[in-house]
Image (cartoon, helix red, strand yellow):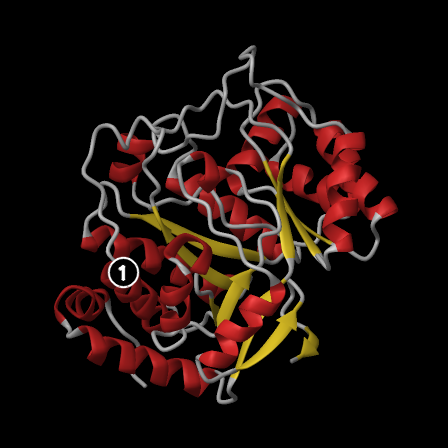
């Protein structure tokens, strides 16, 4: 199949009838994954600190240093959260926090080593590119050396947070203090060359244009062509409640927009094996429908999640409900690891 160029992708995103676009994406998904399997992972998101001095306009989670609600999690609190999560079958912990102005690298490596020692069966999926960049700045080290120290401590993979939309115009409007596009891509490329796989993400539905959606995907595809280090792509829409950006703009939250972006991601990101259905941001019904718009994975159980919750959005599900949603859509549910190895088939 001929690879999509940006002009064709833009036309499909904006003009192709929705069901026709979904059919194209589902065909591409079935060619890459000809079985009827849909996977999901049992994980938990732990935000080790909410202290951040970047002040992204779309974020309701962060607090400035010294705020009465500001916190930095210690190992005792971390252990308690992980013990409860493991009792509920969680196999992966996603660690993310604000860009703290003071925490040295020892805090992060100590946290990773502690989890590896106390919970050796839990996969450590942690730290987005902006966090890596901040660690390097505070510690006076290169990003490669920071990644090497984290990997040695037990880091196994990284999330794709901090991408939002990978164009400088968008970043200048919604997160002007965050590292630029080239820096995000550079950290990801470095991680990939060091054998640290990552996911890739997109947060849409704010100030971006359709052209910028395609530009974002093109930059991800270009990096994947070089490294093959991205394991999956995940998209979700901006949640406006309690955010500075939400008070300034009219947000766009239609299910059709999400399904179009998901389908184009499957078609354009032709070297990405896995496209996740973001049921936790879009709703369970749209999550099901996503399985016919290019998604082959149902994403995460999300035993704990705080960032979207503080932006006024909260959806939860139990394992048996996710299994039912996948099966009811006509697929075989499979629990996976973060590395997409099968844990069990239902």
Instruction: Name the side, left or right, on which 277 lies relative to 7.
Output: right
Instruction: Name the side, left or right, on which 210 lies relative to 317.
Output: left
Quadrant (top left/top right/bottom left/bottom right) for the C terminus: bottom right
Q: Where does label 1 land, which residue?
A: 255
Residue 15, quarter of picture: bottom left
95 and 169: which one is in front?
95
Q: Where is residue 95 in the image (x, y as percent from the top left)?
A: 63, 42
Residue 313, quarter of picture: top left
Category of crowding for the residue at label 1, using alpha-carbon neighbours closer than 10 angstroms: few (below 14), some (14–19), many (at least 20): some
143 and 277: which one is in front?
277
**Residue drawn at point x = 62 percent, y = 34 percent:** 142
* Residue 237, above or below 307: below
**Residue drawn at point x = 50 percent, y = 16 percent:** 64
Q: Can residue 100 be seen in this view?
A: yes
Quadrant (top left/top right/bottom left/bottom right) for the N terminus: bottom left
Instruction: Name the side, left or right, on which 212 lies relative to 30.
Output: left
* Residue 269, above or below 188: below
């Amino acid at each position: 199949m001929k690879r999509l160029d940006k002009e064709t992708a833009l036309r499909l995103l904006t003009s192709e009838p929705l069901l026709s676009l979904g059919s194209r994406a589902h065909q591409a998904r079935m060619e890459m994954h000809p079985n009827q399997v849909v996977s999901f992972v049992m994980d938990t998101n732990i935000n080790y600190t909410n202290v951040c001095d970047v002040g992204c306009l779309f974020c309701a989670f962060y607090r400035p240093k010294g705020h009465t609600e500001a916190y930095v999690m210690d190992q005792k609190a971390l252990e308690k959260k992980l013990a409860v999560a493991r009792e509920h079958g969680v196999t992966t912990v996603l660690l993310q926090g604000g860009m703290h102005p003071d925490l040295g690298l020892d805090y992060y490596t100590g946290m990773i080593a502690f989890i590896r020692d106390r919970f050796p069966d839990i996969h450590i999926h942690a730290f987005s590119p902006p966090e890596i960049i901040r660690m390097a700045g505070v510690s006076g080290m290169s990003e490669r050396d920071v990644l090497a120290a984290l990997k040695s401590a037990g880091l196994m993979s990284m999330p794709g947070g901090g991408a939002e939309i990978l164009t400088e115009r968008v970043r200048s409007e919604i997160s002007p203090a965050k590292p630029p596009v080239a820096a995000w891509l550079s950290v990801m490329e470095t991680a990939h060359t060091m054998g640290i796989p990552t996911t890739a993400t997109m947060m849409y539905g704010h100030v971006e244009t359709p052209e910028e959606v395609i530009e974002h995907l093109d930059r991800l595809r270009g990096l994947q062509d070089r490294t093959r280090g991205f394991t999956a792509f995940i998209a979700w829409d901006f949640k406006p409640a309690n955010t500075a950006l939400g008070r300034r703009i009219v947000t766009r939250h239609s299910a059709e927009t999400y399904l179009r972006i998901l389908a184009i991601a499957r078609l354009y990101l032709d070297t990405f094996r896995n496209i996740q259905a973001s049921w936790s941001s879009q709703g369970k019904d749209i999550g099901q429908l996503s399985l016919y718009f290019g998604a082959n994975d149902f994403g995460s159980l999300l035993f704990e999640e705080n960032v979207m919750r503080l932006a006024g959005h909260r959806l939860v599900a139990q394992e048996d409900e996710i299994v039912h949603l996948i099966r009811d859509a006509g697929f075989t549910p499979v629990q996976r690891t973060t590395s997409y190895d099968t844990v069990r088939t239902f």
